[in-house]
Amino acid sequence: MLADALLLQLGYNATLVTLGAALLGVASGVAGTFLFLRKRALVSDAISHATLPGVGLAFIVMVSLGGDGRWLPGLLLGAGASAALGLLCVQWLSARTRLGEDAAIGAVLSVFFGIGIVILTVIQTMNSGRQAGLEGFLLGSTAGMLRSDAILLAVSAAVVLVLVLALRRPLELAAFDPGYAQATGWTLGRIDLAMMGIVLVVTVVGLKVVGLILIVALLIVPAVTARFWTDRAGHVVLIAGLVGGVSGYVGAATSAVAPALPTGPIVVLVGFSLFLVSLLLSPGRGVLASVLVHRRYQRRVHMRQGLLALAQGQPIFEALTRRLMTREGLILPDGVATVQGQAAASKALLDETRWSIVRADHSFAAAATRYDGLTPIEDILTPDQLSDVDGKIAAPMVVT
């Protein structure tokens, strides 16, 4: 059954919802990347929680006008207006009071969310308007999504994606070098406002899929996941979009198979699974790679200390050092140096002497900063510099 959902074999509506959720995931991952790089991830939390009062008020207004209170465009419009108001409150509190941005975000999201819960409670006491299903905006729900809703979701996500790609250059400048962005004529406030506007749109259109509580995860988790795999901003954007798209696609497909499960948590759990894989297995920053790098470094340190001890005629007591040097054929099991070990020990002692001269000579100041005791000196100094250093080792001391 799940295979049919992943292969888009569950019908036209399920296919449309799955593709719409995937496109939303791509847009969320791409937009959230700049929010993450700008170190303003919590702003998305305030925006998402601030949408709840707008959803409730939009429902009440549409019902009072005799319409269907659950008309999705109207609910999204109310959510957008409320979220914009919440964003303005955060900016005003940060700029005009002594509150930090984190405190302003905490105040706004808690107050707006509390107001929203009160409004939803009032709606539940109403006798008209078909209020059932509004709680789906908390955790997301695609079971009752219509074809028009899915098209609106897909179009909105596509527009957001186009806007992000069009504004990629100033967004990157604001994230990495705000001073340079201002010096080249960009207004930092406008760039931040554009970024928040894009995040606001993504948050609003994502309410139906993942809900206002978990939309933050769809914005931030793909960007954090992508950061494990690359150092280049452009590649982070691409990978984050891919991770978000896969999360939305697989999560929506799974929700179509098990409609009793809320869509939002499934999408987020898929994204978290990809994050966990990246955390463990990414070649640059993953846990496994870090462990391997640490073990290689540890072995190099033990080998270096063992060779220096061997050159100075000192016994080697460390079990790991003895095991590594025995494996490399540098010493015998009883600790006696082999011919290869004697040569390596002499070379290690010579390099240590060379480095002591380099660190004491101001003309080698640049090279001395690269000394770590493990990097071969031939990789840092040129042959002419090595000859100069070796000449100072062999030069006789003149007594005056």
Image: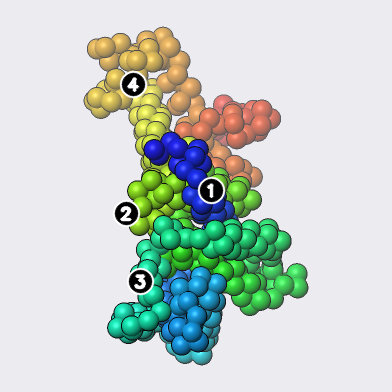
Q: CA distance from mark 2 to mark 1?
A: 20 Å
**Residue at point 49% right, 40% down?**
9
Residue 194 visible in the displayed image: yes
Q: Which residue is mark 1?
A: 12
Q: Which residue is mark 3?
A: 132
Which comes before the other along the chain, label 1 or label 3? 1
Nearest to N terminus: mark 2 or mark 1? 1
Kindly report the distance in space between the C-alpha atoms of the residues bearing marks 4 and 1.
63 Å
Q: Which mark is residue 324?
A: 4
Can residue 396 be seen at all in this image of the molecule?
no
Q: Which residue is mark 2?
A: 260
Report the amino acid beneath label 1.
Tyr
Determine the CA span between mark 1 and mark 3.
25 Å
- Determine the CA span between mark 2 and mark 4: 57 Å
Residue name at image x 25 percent, y 27 percent:
318
SS for dot 2? loop
